Image: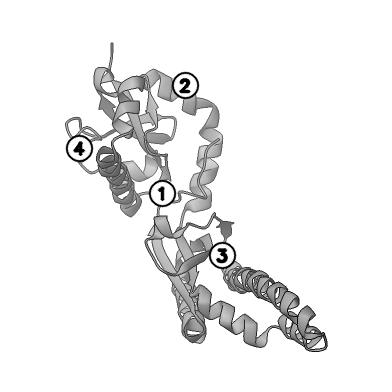
Amino acid sequence: MGNLIYLYGIIPEREEHTDPLPACKGLDGEHDTYSLLLDGIEAVVCELDAEEYGEEQLKQKTEDPNWLHEKAFHHHEALMKLYEKYSVIPMKFCTIYSSEESLKNTLEPHKERIQELFGEIEGKEEWILKIYCDANKIKETVAARNDNVEAKREEISKLSPGRQYLEKRKLDQLIDQEAEREKHRFSENIHENLKEMSADTEVKKNWNRDVTGRQEEMCWNSVYMLKKDEVEDFLEKVKQQQEQWKDDGWIMEVTGPWPSYHFAKIS
């Protein structure tokens, strides 16, 4: 049985000719990475022992969190090194083919789309914005300033004491609902302002506190594809928004640049 082929990403042949592929050990720490040429594109790969990285063996390995963390980090670091030198279409962690022939046959029908993607990501960078909030502070602000909450209080004040007790429970529920709406409204407004500066955007699922490890609640998670000459203005705009709203309980965290994980996808 021949070795398996692990695929990191795809780069333009012309760029690799100008700046040769850097030496790097592959996923197993033994085989070197290298590139496979296919009509104007190059797949950056390494070999893996089929007896160690077959389907069943890989399933067992990925159930080990230490192995998973180490190898996922290796995959990301390898892509970052490629990103520093080339326009790279990154692949998902553990994209593995049975042979070089299998990989080439898979890429063959997508050559035209791959070339289009190279054009779309050239001269651009991917940045991620996460918006967090102090949930208690947002709730306090909503309770004090929200028009719907104020109208409900006015309505309750005109009721009998017995009815007021029951309606105040509904008021608490209304405050919670309006606080959730405020989180989305605020974050969406920030996103819409930044979207105007972006070549492309994508809104992602929020992470819970178990994942973020933070006390603050994540209320927005979005990605932006930016032209390199507009990155500075984008970051300055985020900084200005952060300064404007930090005292109200909002925290904005922007990271990048990253390889085009979200905007250079091949079906």
What is the number of callouts on the image?
4
| Label 2: how many Cα within 10 Å (few below 14, some 14–19, many 20+) | few
Residue sitting farthest toward the top: 1
Residue type indicated by callout 3: Ser
Asked whether the residues under the numbered discs 4 and 3 touch, taking CB atoms below 8 Å apart as contact, a structural biologist would say no
Q: Nearer the viewer, residue 237 or 129?
A: 129
First along the sequence among labels 4 and 1: 4
Q: Label 2, label 3: how many angstroms apart (C-alpha)?
A: 35 Å
Residue type indicated by callout 1: Ser
Residue type indicated by callout 2: Asn
Report x, y in % for residue 118: 48, 46
Q: Which residue, given by chain and number where applicable, does mark 4 sit on?
A: 25
Task: Say which element carries label 2.
Answer: helix
| Label 3: how many Cα within 10 Å (few below 14, some 14–19, many 20+) | some
First along the sequence among labels 2 and 3: 2
Which residue is pictured at 20% across the width and 37% down the height?
25
> Residue 263 vs residue 159: left or right?
left
Instruction: State the quadrant of the C terminus.
Output: top right
| Label 1: how many Cα within 10 Å (few below 14, some 14–19, many 20+) | many
Can you tell which mark lies on residue 198? 3
Quadrant assignment, res 51: top left
Task: Say which element carries label 1.
Answer: loop
Q: Which residue, given by chain and number where applicable, does mark 2 sit on?
A: 105
Q: Label 3, label 1: how many angstroms apart (C-alpha)?
A: 18 Å
Report x, y in % for residue 69: 29, 44
Q: Is residue 194 above or below residue 61?
A: below
Q: Label 4, label 1: how many angstroms apart (C-alpha)?
A: 21 Å
Q: Which residue, given by chain and number where applicable, does mark 1 sit on?
A: 87
Instruction: State the quadrant of the N terminus.
Output: top left
Asked whether the residues under the numbered discs 2 and 3 touch, taking CB atoms below 8 Å apart as contact, a structural biologist would say no
| Label 4: how many Cα within 10 Å (few below 14, some 14–19, many 20+) | some
Report x, y in % for residue 176: 63, 71
